[in-house]
Amino acid sequence: MTKPTKLLEPYQLGPITLTNRTVMAPLTRNRAVEGMVPNPLAIEYYGQRATAGLLITEASQVSQQGQGYQDTPGIYTKEQVAGWKKVTDRVHKDGGHIFIQLWHVGRISHTDLQKDNGKPVAPSAVQAKGKTFVGGKFVDVSEPRALEIGEIPAIIDSFRNAASLAIEAGFDGVEIHGANGYLLDQFAKDGANKRTDAYGGSIENRARLMLEIAKAVADQIGPERTGIRLSPVTPANDISDSNPQPLFDYIVDQLSALKLVFIHVIEGATGGPRDVAPFDYAGLRNRFKGAYIGNNGYDLALAERTLQSGAADLIAFGKPFISNPDLVERFRTGAPLNEGDKATFYGGGEKGYTDYPTLKEKRQAAE
Ligand code: 8OZ
């Protein structure tokens, strides 16, 4: 059995002291209520997991245009801010820290979710091969339209505004969703970006939107409260790039110059093999002055080994945190983990959300 030592050490992340080096990865759960307000059950759900060093919320759209699946929460209305405030209050009361993930899906959306049933927006009018979940079923994503260059400032504003609302809602900071084939990843990668203006073509041009948003958010709430998630080689949501290494080397150099507090890197294929394509993650880590959060398929042994080797500062766990609210305690004691129930990952209520037992509850139930 691996005895974690480094994983359970505190870590200073900008102005906040994390009690350990585990991060709860952002996890889409599709349980938002009317007005895309977080479900009141989210208070209990995140509260139960407050022993993670850092919680990162499920991806939360910065505008209606940025939504791509049914019942994902937003961070653009006062009702949403009020809903999130209850979540952050609980997590802080329970001794945890929490960032919100700011999301714009770009072309991974459906006309049913868009204003006046319009087309989703994207760098270019290229439909992704993939599905989204709307109206209770999986359907093909819609054909998008290319954003006009004049619309880009409003997209940047929507992230700046969401970041400001996040602080109002009591979050310790934000993670910009730059990964998994959503808008910022679509702009960055040449499989989806066919533009010929200042936002397409060269690496500098394709990275521009992600970096302008990172700068706008950091200027608004402070770089020490701004992180970003990246997925250099994932094929998720039909995204691809012909040469990701120089692209992400450039992006990370720029993010480092902006003094972002962390990069959160999905190593390999999201939720799949870590070795899907050759990529030098250590190179990214060495270029970046802030914290490196490693993610994707880590178990306790790999997490501890990675931290010990210095290849990462923090490790994010996704699915293990769905089914183990007391994941950190289980790691500390070497206890077995609960299995997750895939049928309740997306949508629904308490079942598979707030009802996974802690070790203590399991023991009490057995008595
Ligand atoms: C699972 C289902 C829907 C969205 C991501 C936000 O992959 C997501 C997501 C995950 O980053």
Image: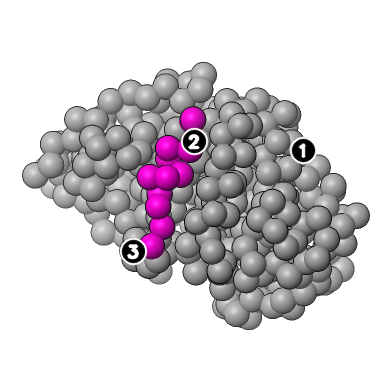
* Disc 2 from disc 1: Cα separation: 26 Å
Residue extending farthest left = 1
Q: Quadrant of residue 273?
A: bottom left
Question: Of the residues shown, which amino acid type is indicated by label 3?
Answer: Asp
Q: Which mark is residue 288?
A: 2
Q: Which residue is mark 1?
A: 161
Question: Of the residues shown, which amino acid type is indicated by label 1?
Answer: Asn
Question: Of the residues shown, which amino acid type is indicated by label 2?
Answer: Phe
Question: What x and y, as percent, mark residue 258?
Answer: 63, 32
Labels 3 and 2: the sequence-earlier one: 3
* Left or right relative to 334: residue 170: right
Residue at 13% of width from left, 36% of height from top?
3
Whether residue 285 is visible here, answered yes or no, is yes
Extent of the magenta region: 278-290
* Disc 3 from disc 2: Cα separation: 22 Å
Q: Is residue 285 magenta?
A: yes
Labels 1 and 3: the sequence-earlier one: 1
* Left or right relative to 219: residue 100: left
Q: Which mark is residue 281?
A: none
